[in-house]
């Protein structure tokens, strides 16, 4: 155990005595702090140290770590040559219903293919996923219909040239859809991974988001940005059904007139051509944004930048780290480009293997 890890652990234990971020036995601030330290280690290739921090985080959420953290810990274990530990973490992922393809569709677990428990775990993962989908088939099918309706009304508005009349129709329809979804989330454990299983992407690996997130986002973008989801989202955060970064991203996507905290999970760091920027307005209120982030267990914006740079430098890395970066396309004219550059500050001036168009 390294001196750095011991010092961080002691500081955390002292701070936790006065920590008020507890709900239902889950200290989401402490958990987030340990996960952040783990991620800062893994992006530097210090996988043993990262595993120690993950172990501390999982101790704060006994029996129910988030899937994304189990996955990253399992990859650290593989890269550190701790195959038995990696297999143990894979079994916990299988219990969440990721399905066998989550293990076989990637080469990240190549060193485990010969493990005595590998084939059985892949089978177990498929059995658990099938059982979860069968058990929740009705509610998931109904939620899918809500997502389809939401997309239909949104597309109708866009196809109308974003006409005001069609926009008002979309808002009214979204109100109805949102109330229906909110009731489902309230009565079904937020449809979290442990209740219905993870969503899978086109590569059969688990997805960070849920299909119904689009309804929540559209509701936050509806009119003044007020939403019926405030209470159910806050409960999901405090009871450990949603990660702090997903919670923050959903809120940050919507209209914000100052009634809600801005967490900087989205639209804080921007890439334009081969440089990373932060706009000066956010830079001036960075201390407040960091305070907002700390209040729900998120890392500081300076630590976030380290993760953004890691993902930018190594886009094909094996880890799943939530560090969002807004991509700026071309500007309509030179004046608009000059204004953006004037109102922003460079935070990383040369993205590797990047060619300016």
Image: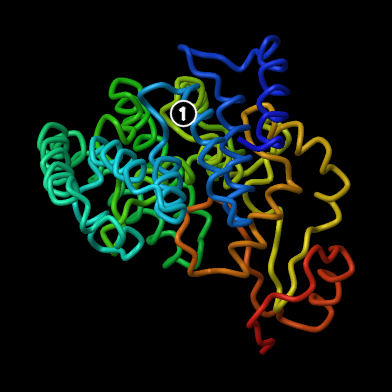
Q: Which residue is drawn at 32% across and 65% down?
A: 107
Q: Is residue 63 above or below residue 281?
A: above
Quadrant location of the C terminus? bottom right
Quadrant location of the N terminus? top right
The residue under label 1 is 58
Q: How is the image coloured?
A: rainbow
The answer to which image quadrant residue 130 occupies is top left
For label 1, the SS is helix
Q: Residue at x 66, y 17 (%)?
A: 13
Spot occupied by residue 326 in the image (x, y as percentages of width and height): 63, 62
Q: Compare residues 165 and 243 and report the one nearer the observer.
A: 243
Viewed as shown, does residue 222 lie left or right of 20? left
Q: Compare residues 238 and 94 and report the one nearer the observer.
A: 94
Viewed as shown, does residue 67 lie left or right of 110? right
Q: Which residue is drawn at 88% across and 47% down?
A: 284
Q: In this view, does 182 lie above or below 302?
A: above
The answer to which image quadrant residue 8 occupies is top right
Q: In this view, does 348 lie above or below 146?
A: below
Spot occupied by residue 151 in the image (x, y as percentages of width and height): 35, 55
Q: Compare residues 133 and 28 and report the one nearer the observer.
A: 28
């Amino acid at each position: 155990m390294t001196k750095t890890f011991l010092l961080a652990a002691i500081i955390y234990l002292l701070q936790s005595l006065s920590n008020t971020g507890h709900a239902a036995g889950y200290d989401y601030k402490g958990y987030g702090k340990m996960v952040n330290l783990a991620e800062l280690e893994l992006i530097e290739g210090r996988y043993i140290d990262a595993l120690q921090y993950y172990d501390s985080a999982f101790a704060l959420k006994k029996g129910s770590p988030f899937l994304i953290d189990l996955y990253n810990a399992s990859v650290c274990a593989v890269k550190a040559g701790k195959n038995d530990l990696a297999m143990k973490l894979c079994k916990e992922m299988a219990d969440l219903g990721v399905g066998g393809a989550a293990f076989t569709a990637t080469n990240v677990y190549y060193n485990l293919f010969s493990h005595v428990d590998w084939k059985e775990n892949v089978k177990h993962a498929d059995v658990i996923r099938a059982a979860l989908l069968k058990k929740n088939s009705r509610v998931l099918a109904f939620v899918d219909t809500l997502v389809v309706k939401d997309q239909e009304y949104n597309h109708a508005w866009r196809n109308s040239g974003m006409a005001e009349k069609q926009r008002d129709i979309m808002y009214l329809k979204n109100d109805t859809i949102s109330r229906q979804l909110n009731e489902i989330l309230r009565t079904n454990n937020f449809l979290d991974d442990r209740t219905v299983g993870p969503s899978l992407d086109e590569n059969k690996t688990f997805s960070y988001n849920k299909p119904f997130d689009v309804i929540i986002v559209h509701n936050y973008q509806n009119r003044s940005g007020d939403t019926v989801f405030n209470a159910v989202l806050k409960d999901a955060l405090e009871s450990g059904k949603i990660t702090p970064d997903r919670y923050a991203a959903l809120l940050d996507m919507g209209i914000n007139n100052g009634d809600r905290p801005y967490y900087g999970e989205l639209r804080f760091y921007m890439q334009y051509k081969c440089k990373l920027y932060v706009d000066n307005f956010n830079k001036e209120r960075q201390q407040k944004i960091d305070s907002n982030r700390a209040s729900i267990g998120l890392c500081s914006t300076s630590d976030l930048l380290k993760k953004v740079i890691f993902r930018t430098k190594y886009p094909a890395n094996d880890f799943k780290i939530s560090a969002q970066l807004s991509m700026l396309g071309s500007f309509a004219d030179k004046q608009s480009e000059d204004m953006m550059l004037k109102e922003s500050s460079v935070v990383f001036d040369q993205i590797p293997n990047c060619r300016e168009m």
